[in-house]
Image (cartoon, helix red, strand yellow):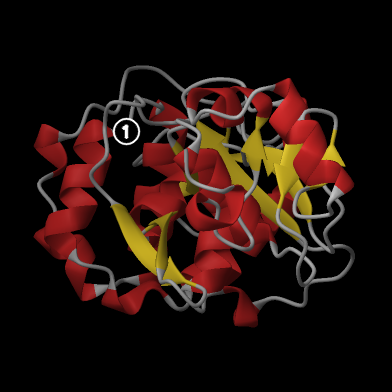
Amino acid sequence: MKAIGQILNEGVLVDRRWLNENGFDRTSIDYYMRSKTLKAVNRGVYRKPGPPLKWQNVVYSLSSLGYSVHVGHMTALNFHGYTHYLELSGAKVISLYCDKKLPRWTFQIEIKEKLQQVLRNPFSFDRTAGLEEIPFGTWDWPVRYSVPERAFLELLSTVDSATEIQQADTLFEGAANLRPVLVQEMMEQCRQVKAKRLFLWLAKRHDFPWFKKLDINKIDLGKGKRQIVKDGILDKDYLITIPKEMVNEQTEPLF
């Protein structure tokens, strides 16, 4: 059996099951702990001693442990350079998507950022289009991110207030270079009507050239009206309520 230092890279988190599967029983784990070759960072979670962990270490480690996890929503948009249009404050939140509940220790690891699992996913988890692997760290570990075309839909799927729509509108100012073919694919795969309608409304509002290349007839926009904000105004094209502050001549009261 190889020594722990030969198979466990610095910065990678592993759990007791991983250690057992790789030939390390309780006695050997205790030995490595006493010799300070292995360090417990949470109950049943270990790493080699080293520099402070970054949130990317946690995400990559989850992937290595079998979790189909990716970075999305606002975090992905920030990575792609869109959130410089907004003034962000408070602790940095890292938004993660996964096909199953992430282990509790994910949110207890001591790092600067706050990790959160987004439970409202507008895509089926078997839909992997719009995800890309970005190398991280000395060993270029792959961390999966949503591309902007997917991340915008992830963001819009959680929008529930006038303030959030206005923030999304600000982010959309930088969306002139979205790829129409990929936008089309994401829109056809997206399973949340509200997110798709709001996406199209924002795209039309900003009059991006790629918007005119979309085949709206192939996108399932559902039926009936959708109330996104209370006391909003109904947009006639996409039948969603929008904030009164963003009204134009094509709108009318919903109620």
197 w.r.t. 101: above or below: below
Front residue (pair 53, 252):
53
Residue 80: x percent and y percent?
Answer: 46, 74
Q: Residues within 10 Å of mark 1 (few under 14, many from 20)?
A: many
Name the spot of residue 166 as percent of width and height, x first: 65, 60
As displayed, is residue 255 above or below residue 208?
above
Residue positioned 77% across, 77% down in the render: 87
Q: What residue is rendered at 37% in x and 39% in y?
A: 196
Q: Quadrant of residue 24?
A: top right
Q: Can you give x and y, in whole percent of width and height, for residue 215 in the image? A: 9, 46
In the picture, measured across the screen, residue 63 lies left or right of residue 83, that is left
Question: Could you tell me which residue is drawn at 38 percent across and 67 percent down?
Answer: 134
Residue 236 in view of the camera = no
Image height check: is 218 above or below 3? above
Residue 20 shown left or right of residue 225 in the figure: right
Residue type (three-letter) at the residue carrying disc 1? Cys
Residue matched to label 1: 190
Tell which of 227 and 38 is nearer to you.
Answer: 38
Q: Which of 30 and 184 is in front in this view?
A: 30
